[in-house]
Amino acid sequence: MHSESGKGNGFRIVVLILFVTWPWGGKTLLHAQDARSAEDHLLAEGISFYRELEYERALSSFRRLLDGAVLSRTERARVLVAIGATHVVLEEEDAAMSAFLEAFSTDPDVRLFSPFEAPKIREGFEKARKRFEEEIQRSDQESPRIFFTPLAERIRGNTPLQVSATVVDNIKVVEVRFSFRRAGDLAYTTIRMTPMAGDRYVVSIPPFMVTGEALEYYLEARDVAGNVTLDGNEKHPYVVEIIPPKTPWYRQGFTWIAAAGTAASILALYLVVRQDPDVLALDGTIEGTIGTVTTTPGVLDAD
């Protein structure tokens, strides 16, 4: 009796241990969530100190976040902006410039954000941007790379034309442009392509501009240092043949010829009936120079 009770207690203990230790399989997810929470806390803490004019404590929070957290490129650049802005308020110009320059090196598209938008901060931020771009222009000799699949050899005229290309650069692409003209024209029309996700750029040419016998086009990309890459050019563009657009049914000649013939036949029958109502009693055909009409008794009523 006692022995059976002991076995039962042992079983319950084993079950309890399994139950307690099982949830630890998700500790990685919990650690990731805790890390993100800590990062958010440090950023919020630093901003709170900044708003309360406790700038040294704000810098301490921002630096701990910068040194200890795993941040994305965009997040790291924003923290550096916060550090630079705080140095501006403390009138530490060199430290502010250093932080801003590092922010631009991390993410050339970084922007000021609240509460770091005071005129004095913006002045220092733009000054750093200018210096960054000047340094890039002196040191960056690598041009953008364009990855583009030429359009089909033939396209239908008067239809929208969609163009897409992927453009990458070691620093930053400033703009990608699509230039085109009708074959035989002197001047090109240039449209700035819209940046999308994944370094992709797109442009849509309206139907009324897709005309003529052929379309000539080329692409141009420019980076922040002013380096330019062309895919095709003014003298040696890509060429795509334009197929005449399909004529709508209501504009096709045979449609109206057929309609005119039918109307003429009906008119001929009407005139014959007006002259001789008894013709409706006939089961046959009426022939004339404008066509042949078949009549069936009782189909029409004479006036």
Image (spheres, grey):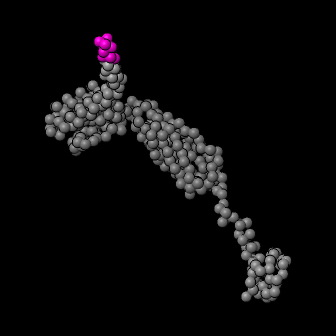
Q: Nearer the viewer, residue 186 or 148?
A: 148
Q: Where residue 284 appears, x then y in whole percent?
A: 85, 77
Which residue corresponds to the image point at 15% horizontal and 39% vertical from the top-left?
52
Q: Where residue 143 appears, x then y in whole percent?
A: 46, 34
Q: Where residue 216 appears, x then y in whole percent?
A: 59, 47
Q: Is residue 52 above or below residue 291?
A: above
Relative to 182, is 51 on the left or the right?
Answer: left
Q: Is residue 286 above or below residue 119?
A: below
Which residue corresponds to the image point at 48% horizontal and 42% vertical from the top-left?
201
Look at the image and give the residue range highlighted in magenta.
Answer: 1-11
Q: Nearer the viewer, residue 83 or 259?
A: 259
Q: Which quadrant does the C terminus fall into?
A: bottom right
Relative to 277, is 3 on the left or the right?
Answer: left
Which residue corresponds to the image point at 32% horizontal and 27% vertical from the top-left?
30
Q: Is residue 206 above or below residue 117?
A: below
Q: How many discs mark residues in the rendered view?
A: 0
Q: Nearer the viewer, residue 97 or 11?
A: 11
Relative to 61, is 275 on the left or the right?
Answer: right
Relative to 287, is 174 on the left or the right?
Answer: left
Q: In terms of image quadrants, where is residue 142?
A: top left
Magenta stretch containing residue 10, yes or no? yes
Q: Where residue 134 appears, x then y in whole percent?
A: 35, 35
Residue 169 shows up from this direction: yes
